[in-house]
Amino acid sequence: MFIEPGTKRSKEKGTGWIEVISGSMFSGKTEELIRRLNRARIANLNVEIFKPGIDVRYDEEDIVSHNRNSIRSTPVNMAEEILLYSGNCDVVGIDEAQFFDEALVDVVNKLANNGKRVILAGLDMDFNGRPFGPMPQLMAIAEYVTKVHAICVNCGNIAHYSFRKSASENQILLGEHDVYEARCRSCFREGIDH
């Protein structure tokens, strides 16, 4: 269970840190990101939130969970844009981190080194069950990593794979329940073997 670190950052020491929320599709990553960002706002911290510009599934600007909870964000096309827009904030939230370029690792390190709390959410694996984008490096440098799980639609066990139901081989294919379903290891392997 994740124990949320102190919400007030130490301004004297300039201590920042990185938190990564990872898991499969439909596991509650964005829901948890929104929860943590709202708690930071309750603590009167200045929060800036970003998402990749390509993610327009629910809204062009807001981050929206599959449960339709939302929070205002700034869409950006490249990770380095986050540095330009994060300014004097205390907390930086980033959704769908797997869609960003590899520069995201350096960007979040700079933010944390400058005393900011950085909270990222993203898929840890792509539809082939392979590490996705900058997520492995982000998980390696993070002080806190939370892996959330979905429920397998086939058997009801804990799921941590995003099974793609379409024939597309593109690594990035935005979709919902029409394109993806959460599966456990066994049901995922069964689906890709057929």
Image (cartoon, rainbow, N blue to C red):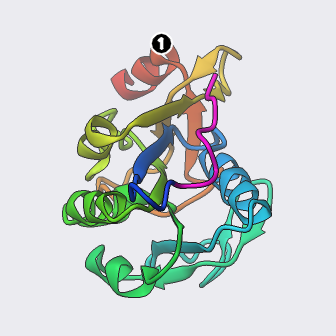
What kind of secondary structure does the magenta stretch mostly adopt?
A: loop
From the top left corner, tell me how far across and down residue 189 is, in percent: 40, 19
Q: Position of residue 142 (x, y in %)?
A: 35, 41
User: Which residue is rendered at x = 58% and y = 34% of the image?
Assistant: 182
Percent of width and height locating residue 160? 51, 27
Q: Nearer the viewer, residue 182 or 42?
A: 42
Q: Quadrant of residue 156?
A: top right
Q: Is residue 62 above or below residue 129?
A: below
Nearer-the-camera pick, 57 or 123: 123
Magenta segment includes 148? no
Q: Residue at x 55, y 60 (%)?
A: 175
State which quadrant residue 52 falls in. bottom left
Placement of 100 over or under 26, stated as above or below: below
Q: Residues within 10 Å of mark 1 (few under 14, many from 20)?
A: some
Q: Which residue is mark 1?
A: 186
Q: Is residue 101 left or right of residue 124?
A: left
Magenta span includes 6: yes
Q: Which residues are magenta?
A: 1-9
Which amino acid, by three-letter code, is at mark 1?
A: Ser
**Relative depth, front residue between 141 and 90:** 90
165 to the left or right of 153: left
At 39% from the left and 59% from the top, the residue drawn is 14
Q: Position of residue 3 (x, y in %)?
A: 63, 29
Measuring 45% from the left and 44% from the top, which residue is drawn there? 20
Q: Residue furthest front?
A: 12
Mark 1 falls on what kind of element?
Answer: helix
Q: Nearer the viewer, residue 66 or 191?
A: 66
Give the position of the C terminus as an image quadrant.
Answer: top left
Which quarter of the rendered picture does the N terminus lie within? top right
